Structure formats: structure tokens, C-alpha cells
Image (cartoon, helix red, strand yellow):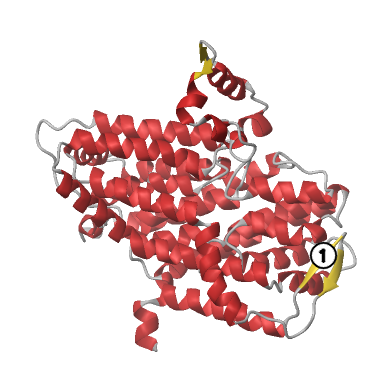
């Protein structure tokens, strides 16, 4: 058992947490909140065999687009990493930052953290992380520091959610639908401050660790999943630069809440203008895309910039893959082999992400979380930042998506009004984000650890000081907000 945990500690922890969820579903009666009042369910109606077997189908159905997108990313890197242009890009970026390794790593960390905090779908950033990891490893940064500067920085952005991060929009939607006066910009100044504090503290520990590891001559670039050799002398990086710039631009345009977060309507107006452009009586773009789908109520809203689905972005990724395939001038069989190699390298991380989503499916079937939150809430007759923080930490342990927190606990959170309502939302959003640094069902965490083959134990040893320090800082902030 000790050997199993040592070699596969992440898998053991994930399955262990799933087992805890199943066990607790039998010990703690399920329930729900209605108008701020807890309604207890029937005892001894926990997660059964049918829940588990049906849950496998449910997770594939509910998260098929996320899984398909990650497969597309694997295909992209499987093909792109064999091109001379991609090799030239990795090499030139690594050479460009030569002598400024720590500064470059901190810059990457900042960009990833800010982007995560603003995008309403953060899985799209997995499109760029393998490239950044390859560059950092080529520069001599250790695997752990490369992980912290990329996947770890996504967790920084999740904690310091500003107008985005995974699920914030839907979290707010569920609360507003239940009657709470809240938007994604409610207390956004405080959350921006928390983002900056989180980044500074996280970067401090990363720099300290990086300075030590840079003296280690071990060549970890060889451990890169998509490691590339030196390009040919005449290889040009600009075609691949163009591909990544286009993909990043569409990620920003498509997944930032421009209108709700910044009051910018120009992109919505632009979308409406190009959709209305006609040749004769025919609207050109809707006709090319499929008029009946473009005009459907379920799809049309998510074609507008700022409210994209992952499916919308995947269309552009697929087109870029086709262009890269053609530009590589490789034989079709070789291209398919490279694509398959990329899928295989992503298979294990995707499997772990699927297991993280499976935990949500189980909690959706039989959720004991409301009962736990209700019992902890009895510790204080009024809003208490310490009780709320404890609640949020436990909720974050068993959840990998913030929108599910809003879905399952909106009936509880609407019981708070005025200043307390604003503060408790800040507490839940940030404490949920803090727990994503260590819970074994955190999507960015499990994908990254699996992708880079880093044991969970090593990550925990690396992050625990930051976790404790950030927890103390947040508790101080919540106390000041509540009692001053």
C-alpha cells in the first residue's frame, strides 16, 4: 500500500476522496436550502451502485465538451511540436529570456493569473500552458517551478477571481435568481486586492524556490512531455507565433465578460453588424454557419463575444489545427501518428480531470454539503467570518467548480443581506479558490500534476507554507471587513 501511494499518490487521493463522498452520503442526510431555511432529506439514502454506474455516463454527457477540447489541445501539440516553426518558437522564447529567467517566469505567472481571474472559462488556458512549460524547462527552470508559474498561477487567478474564473458567472446567476442583489462586479475592488496579494505571496515563495533550483544542473527539459530539439537554421517562428496570437486573442475576446464586467457594448454591436451583413436577401455569415443553429435561443447568445461556449472556441482551434497540418507538409500518415501521440500524452491528465468532474456528479445526485453548512452555521447566530470561512473551505474541498457552490447553496447564502451578503460572497469565492490549491479534485491541479508527472506529496510540501500564510491573510481581511 505504501508503494502504491508513493508511485500513484494523486490517483489514490482522488479515489479516496470519492470514497469519502460516498461514505458521508450515507452518514449525513442529504438536504437543501429553501429561502434560507434548511430542509433535511431522508436518512440512509446515500450514493448507491446505480448512482455510480449512471454517474459515469452523466459525467461524459455533462463534460463532454471539456473532454473533447482537451483532446483537441493534445492533437494540436502532437502535430505542432513536430513542426520546425514550433521548435523555433520554443527556442527563441527561451533564448530571449536568457539571463532573465526569474523575471520571465514571474511575467508568465502574472499573465496566467490575471487571465484566469478574468476569463469565464479557464480550461481554455490549457491551450497555452504546454508551450509555456516547454519554454520554462528549456530555460533551466525546475519542473516544480515551471508548474507553479503556469498551472499554479491558474490557481492564483481562481482564488483572486475578479470578473471571471471558472464558474463565477453562473455562481452569481444562481444567487441573483434566488433573490440576492449581486453581480460579478459586486465587491470586485476587494477581490482585485486579494488577487494582487495572492500573486505577491505566491511569487515570493516561487522566487525563493527558483533561486535554489536554478543552481541545480539537472536537465529537466528532457522530462518535458512535448520536448523539442533544435530547429533547422532557416526555420521561422512567425507562423506559430501567429497561430498562438490568434488563439489567445479569441480566448480574450470570447471569454471575458466585456459588457457585464466593463460596460463595453462595442463587441456585441460588432457581432450584430457582421451577422446582419447581407448579399441580396441572404445574411452571409449565418448562412455559412447554419442559419437555424445561429438563430436558435440555446446557441445564439453564446456566439457573442464575452459569452462564448468552449464549443465556439473549439471551432477556431480545429481550423488552426487544419492549417498547421497543411503548413507542416508532412505525409498524412505521419500527421495522424503525431496527432495520436498528442492524444496519448493527454490521456492520463484527461482521465484525472474526468474523475474530478465525477465527484461533482455524485454530489449532484446526493449532496450532504448543505447539511454540513447548516450545522456549522449554528455556531453563530449572526454572520461570522470565521464560521463562513470554515464552511467555504469544506465546500471547496469537495467541489471543483464554483458554479456548483452557487447552485447547491444559493438558498443558504440569500439568507444574508446588506454588507454581510457582500462579505460572505467574497469569503466563499476566495476560500473556494484557496482550497483548489490542495484538494485532489481541483481541475487545474490534477491536470497539471499528471501532465508534468509531479507527485501530489511534492506539491503539498511546496505549497503548504503559502496556503497557511494566505489563509491567515484572508482571515484578517474578512475580520476587518466585518468588524470595522
Who's the residue at 25% across and 43% down the image?
Answer: 80
Please determine whether, in this image, residue 468 is positioned above or below residue 96: below
Work out which residue is located at the far top of the displayed protein and give it: 280
334 and 437: which is toward the camera: 334
* Figure quadrant of the N terminus: bottom left
Q: Nearer the viewer, residue 341 or 462?
A: 341
Residue 40 visible at all: yes
Asked which quadrant contains residue 344, the reply is bottom left
Q: Quadrant of residue 147?
A: bottom left
Instruction: Tell whether 327 sits left or right of 200.
Output: left
Residue furthest to the bottom: 1
411 to the left or right of 458: right
Figure label count: 1
Asked whether residue 462 is in view, the answer is no
**Judging from the image, what secondary structure is the residue with disc 1 in?**
strand
Residue at image point 71% right, 51% down: 426
Q: Which is nearer the eye, 407 or 300?
A: 300
Q: Is residue 262 above or below residue 397?
A: above
> How far across and down, in percent of the image, does residue 81 sit?
23, 46
Which residue appears at 87% of the width and 61% of the height?
Answer: 36
Give how far across and how far down residue 211 sits, in percent.
34, 54
Which residue position holds label 1? 33
**For residue 347, side relative to residue 356 (left or right):** left
| Residue 79 image point, x, y percent | 24, 46
Amino acid at each position: 500500500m505504501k508503494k502504491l501511494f508513493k508511485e500513484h499518490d494523486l490517483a489514490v487521493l482522488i479515489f479516496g476522496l470519492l470514497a469519502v463522498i460516498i461514505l458521508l452520503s450515507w452518514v449525513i442526510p442529504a438536504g437543501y436550502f429553501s429561502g434560507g431555511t434548511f430542509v433535511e432529506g431522508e436518512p440512509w439514502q446515500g450514493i448507491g451502485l446505480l448512482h455510480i454506474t449512471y454517474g459515469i455516463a452523466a459525467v461524459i454527457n455533462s463534460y463532454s465538451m471539456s473532454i473533447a477540447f482537451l483532446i483537441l489541445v493534445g492533437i494540436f501539440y502532437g502535430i505542432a511540436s513536430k513542426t520546425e516553426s514550433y521548435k523555433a518558437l520554443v527556442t527563441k522564447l527561451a533564448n530571449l529570456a536568457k539571463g532573465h529567467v526569474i523575471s520571465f517566469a514571474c511575467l508568465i505567472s502574472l499573465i496566467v493569473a490575471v487571465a484566469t481571474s478574468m476569463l469565464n472559462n479557464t480550461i481554455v488556458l490549457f491551450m497555452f500552458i504546454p508551450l509555456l512549460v516547454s519554454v520554462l524547462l528549456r530555460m533551466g527552470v525546475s519542473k516544480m517551478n515551471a508548474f507553479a508559474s503556469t498551472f499554479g498561477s491558474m490557481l492564483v487567478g481562481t482564488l483572486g477571481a475578479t470578473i471571471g474564473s471558472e464558474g463565477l458567472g453562473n455562481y452569481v446567476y444562481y444567487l441573483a435568481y434566488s433573490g440576492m442583489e449581486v453581480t460579478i462586479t459586486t465587491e470586485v475592488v476587494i477581490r482585485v486586492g486579494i488577487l494582487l496579494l495572492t500573486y505577491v505571496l505566491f511569487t515570493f515563495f516561487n522566487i525563493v524556490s527558483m533561486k535554489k533550483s536554478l543552481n541545480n544542473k539537472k536537465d529537466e527539459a528532457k522530462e518535458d512531455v512535448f520536448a523539442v530539439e533544435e530547429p533547422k537554421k532557416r526555420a521561422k517562428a512567425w507562423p506559430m507565433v501567429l497561430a498562438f496570437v490568434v488563439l489567445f486573442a479569441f480566448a480574450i475576446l470570447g471569454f471575458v465578460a466585456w459588457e457585464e464586467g466593463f460596460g463595453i457594448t462595442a463587441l456585441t454591436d460588432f457581432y450584430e453588424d457582421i451577422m446582419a451583413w447581407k448579399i441580396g436577401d441572404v445574411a452571409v455569415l449565418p448562412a455559412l454557419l447554419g442559419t437555424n443553429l445561429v438563430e436558435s435561443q440555446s446557441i445564439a447568445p453564446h456566439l457573442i463575444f464575452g459569452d462564448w461556449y468552449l464549443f465556439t472556441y473549439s471551432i477556431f482551434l480545429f481550423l488552426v489545427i487544419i492549417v498547421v497540418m497543411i503548413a507542416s507538409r508532412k505525409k498524412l500518415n505521419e500527421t495522424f501518428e503525431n496527432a495520436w501521440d498528442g492524444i496519448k500524452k493527454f490521456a492520463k491528465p484527461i482521465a484525472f480531470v474526468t474523475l474530478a468532474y465525477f465527484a461533482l456528479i455524485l454530489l449532484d445526485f446526493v449532496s450532504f454539503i448543505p447539511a454540513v453548512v447548516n450545522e456549522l452555521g449554528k455556531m453563530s447566530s449572526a454572520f461570522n467570518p470565521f464560521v463562513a470561512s470554515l464552511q467555504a473551505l469544506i465546500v471547496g474541498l469537495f467541489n471543483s467548480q464554483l458554479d456548483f457552490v452557487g447552485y447547491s447553496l444559493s438558498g443558504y447564502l440569500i439568507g444574508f443581506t446588506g454588507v454581510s451578503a457582500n462579505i460572505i460572497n467574497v469569503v466563499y469565492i476566495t476560500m473556494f479558490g484557496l482550497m483548489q490549491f490542495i484538494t485532489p479534485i481541483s481541475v487545474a491541479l490534477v491536470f497539471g500534476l499528471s501532465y508534468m508527472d509531479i507527485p501530489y506529496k511534492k506539491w503539498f510540501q511546496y505549497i503548504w507554507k503559502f496556503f497557511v500564510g494566505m489563509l491567515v491573510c484572508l482571515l484578517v481581511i474578512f475580520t476587518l471587513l466585518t468588524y470595522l
